Image (cartoon, grey):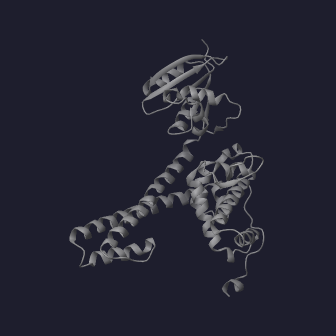
Amino acid sequence: MTIAMIGLDTAKNLFQVHGLDEGGGAVLRRKLHRSELVGFFEQQPRCTVFLEARGAGHYWGRLLSGFGREVELIAPAAVRPFVKRGRKNDAAAALCGAGTRPETGFVPIKSVEPQAVLALHAGRSLPVKQQTMVANALRGLAGEFGVTVPRGLHKLEELAALASAGEGIPAAGRQAMAELYAHRRAAAERVATLEEQIVRHARQDATARRLAAIPGIGPITASLIAATVGDHVGAFRSARRFAAWLGLVPRQRSTGGRTRLGGITKAGNAEIRRLLVLGATSMVRRATRWDSKAGLWVRGVLARRPVRLVTVALANKLARIAWALMTRGEVHQAQGRAPAAAATAA
């Protein structure tokens, strides 16, 4: 029995193993405990191991590669069609099926350093969401007692002060709102601490520094793209494929020879896509002062298209520019001219 390839379905403690020989026949099906996995692969001959690019996939990819195994990570979306309905335990066999298809694209294995940077971004993302949730809850509770302030996170301090001094609010209500405001301030402090480390990475990493020079891409977005893609940008053969991976291309509903385009696919990395759209939104709002070739393009599209559509189109363009800079190792140079100081002041 010669094992040529192994599909490894990872989990917290129990791992499913499915082995195929050179002819594609199943020769091994086992369930291994986490403590048995390393010893099992040490006894196996050299073979190709297919893993799903999720959870601890990159960790196991680095570990098994150290044993001289050829490890390939597969995106979950590419594995899902090979899982038979109602047979979730056949995920290891589905990995072998997906890995042997010629059209399957593999995910590069990340090293420890970029994964640590991505941990910073994940740690920042949670308290950012919590700030919004707490702010909405605080406004809702205060509104129940007739206390309101204008929109904006910077207005929450005023809202907390009004709620604390509100004579018509019982002590229990004031305490609840005070606790929410304290939680929001603590989350904001955590976000600021993590952002300092992310900005430090963006300034030290050469790829992130080049990306941060693109209008609409700040240090946080640049750091996230550099840590996620980094040296593996060659996996995307064109700028359009990179934008498609981020889900910034239209969904096609073509039939009968007609090409019908819908909304964007929203596939791939949602956090990078969200940050690119936020950066594009900021640039669209300042389009009248953006005197360059890109600014002229934005103003031209705004004249005939809705603002939201222009924002997503600009995010697509930013993604393509980022791909070009990472692929060619170039520094961004805006085409056109910036407004003179006197004209700007006027």
Residue at 30% over, 68% down: 177
Relative height, residue 120 to residue 91 (above, below): below
Residue 128 shown left or right of residue 64 in the figure: left
Identify whether 51 is placed above or below 260.
above
> Which of the two residues, 22 or 88, is positioned nearer the viewer here?
88
Q: Quadrant of the N terminus?
A: top right
Placement of the C terminus among the 4 image quadrants: bottom right
For the view shown, which residue lies furthest in the left direction? 171
Left or right: 39, with 187 as reference point: right
User: Where 335 sits versus 20, above or below?
Assistant: below
Residue 302 visible, this orientation:
yes
- At 47% from the left and 27% from the top, the residue drawn is 15
Outermost residue to the top: 1
Q: Where, by quadrant of the figure, is residue 221 drawn?
A: bottom right
Residue 245 in picture, x, y percent from top left: 65, 48
Position of residue 310 measured from the top left corner of the image (x, y, whole percent) = 67, 65
Which residue lies at the image location 44% right of the left edge and 73% below the top edge? 154
x, y percent for residue 63: 54, 32
Tag count: 0
Residue extending farthest to the bottom is: 346
Nearer the observer, 5 or 313: 313
- Whole-percent x, y for residue 96 in the image: 60, 26
Instruction: Determine which quarter of the picture holds residue 281.
Output: bottom right
Residue 21, placed above or below residue 153: above
